[in-house]
Image (cartoon, grey):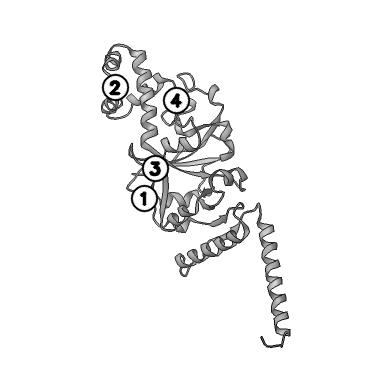
């Protein structure tokens, strides 16, 4: 088993360098899972329901898909798996009609990928995104790590690929025999393409296998907590709750990072100045009332 990092084209905005900074926006309970070295994965069939309705839809010509599948060891057994469940008339057509067979196998292949692959989705950019906060963690947090750290933490008893998603106008993007050489890593990986409507996500996906009926699940990641560089509090949490959450996370990290430097916990760049000014005013007011209390010598 291994972790495979798929390189990006030279002109791509996201280059898969080991120092690449990745941010994951998440609800607070998923942070608790990370602090216990458990990385959350969502099956692609469920990921599409909550995000992109075109998740895992065909982008490659059916004949190209079938030819690629034939190059895989034990492809015969895999084809039998894809055909399983077909109706009687469909099985007859599969034996006698080559074009139909290709279309059917390609369609079943995409369904199979949606059912048996799961992803952990990360944002790759040098600044925060208001759209990502609003979509994925309005009342949560964001965790920052780097690509090398995440790779080293993934377990060796399971296979992973890590790759940047590409964004295209879906209706105009098609991989066929004429341009297949330009997209070698995408022919059998429809989950590495999304419509341009999602380009703000700047997504890097960690993909692994899952069961066809599996819900979201955790993968044990060795000392993943050491990959965390900082934790950011959502700017859409009310100020009092955000301040309390920040203190709570700091306490959790101090407990985990005994004798080690703890990651930074901070407010979002969207409202950081406001929160810092608010904290400064609170200290000033507290000191003022403390002085006034000392002046009051009349007993209660």
Q: Distance between the residues labelled 4 and 2?
A: 19 Å
Q: Can residue 294 be seen in this view?
A: yes
Q: Which of marks 4 and 3 is in front?
A: 4
Task: Single out the mark in the foreground, 1 or 4.
Answer: 4
Residue underneath mark 2: 86
For this view, does 219 lie left or right of residue 290?
Answer: left
Tell me the CA gap for discs 1 and 2.
36 Å
Q: Name the residue under label 1.
A: 155
Reply above or below: 234 against 182. below
Quarter-of-image position of residue 71:
top left
Asked if the residue at tag 2 contacts the one at tag 1, i.e. Cβ–Cβ closer than 8 Å, the answer is no
Asked whether disc 1 touches disc 4, contact meaning CB atoms under 8 Å apart, the reply is no
Label 3 – label 2 distance at C-alpha? 30 Å
The residue labelled by disc 3 is: 160
Q: Residues within 10 Å of mark 3 (few under 14, many from 20)?
A: many
Mark 4 = which residue? 58
């Amino acid at each position: 088993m291994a972790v495979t990092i798929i390189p990006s084209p030279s002109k791509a905005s996201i280059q898969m360098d080991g120092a690449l900074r990745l941010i994951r926006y998440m609800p607070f309970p998923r942070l608790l899972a990370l602090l216990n070295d458990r990385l959350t994965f969502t099956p692609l069939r469920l990921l599409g329901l909550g995000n992109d309705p075109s998740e895992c839809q065909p982008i490659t010509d059916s004949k190209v898909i079938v030819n690629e599948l034939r190059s895989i060891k034990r492809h015969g057994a895999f084809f039998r798996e894809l055909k399983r469940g077909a109706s009687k008339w469909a099985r007859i057509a599969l034996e006698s009609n080559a074009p139909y067979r290709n279309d059917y196998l390609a369609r079943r292949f995409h369904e199979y990928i949606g059912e048996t692959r799961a992803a952990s989705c990360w944002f790759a950019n040098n600044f925060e995104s208001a759209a990502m906060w609003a979509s994925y963690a309005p009342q949560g947090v964001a965790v920052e790590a780097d690509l090398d750290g995440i790779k080293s933490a993934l377990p060796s008893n399971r296979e992973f690929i890590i790759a940047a998603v590409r964004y295209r106008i879906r209706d105009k993007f098609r991989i066929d025999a004429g341009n297949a050489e330009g997209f070698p890593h995408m022919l059998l990986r429809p989950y590495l393409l999304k419509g341009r409507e999602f380009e703000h996500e700047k997504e890097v996906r960690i993909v692994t296998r899952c069961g066809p009926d599996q819900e979201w699940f955790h993968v044990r990641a060795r000392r993943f907590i050491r990959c965390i560089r900082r934790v950011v509090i959502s700017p859409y949490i009310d100020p009092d709750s955000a301040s309390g959450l920040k203190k709570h996370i700091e306490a959790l990290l101090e407990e985990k990072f005994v004798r080690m430097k703890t990651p930074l916990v901070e407010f979002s760049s969207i409202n950081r100045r406001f929160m810092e000014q608010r904290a400064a005013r609170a200290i000033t007011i507290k000191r003022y009332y403390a002085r006034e209390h000392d002046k009051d010598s009349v007993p209660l």
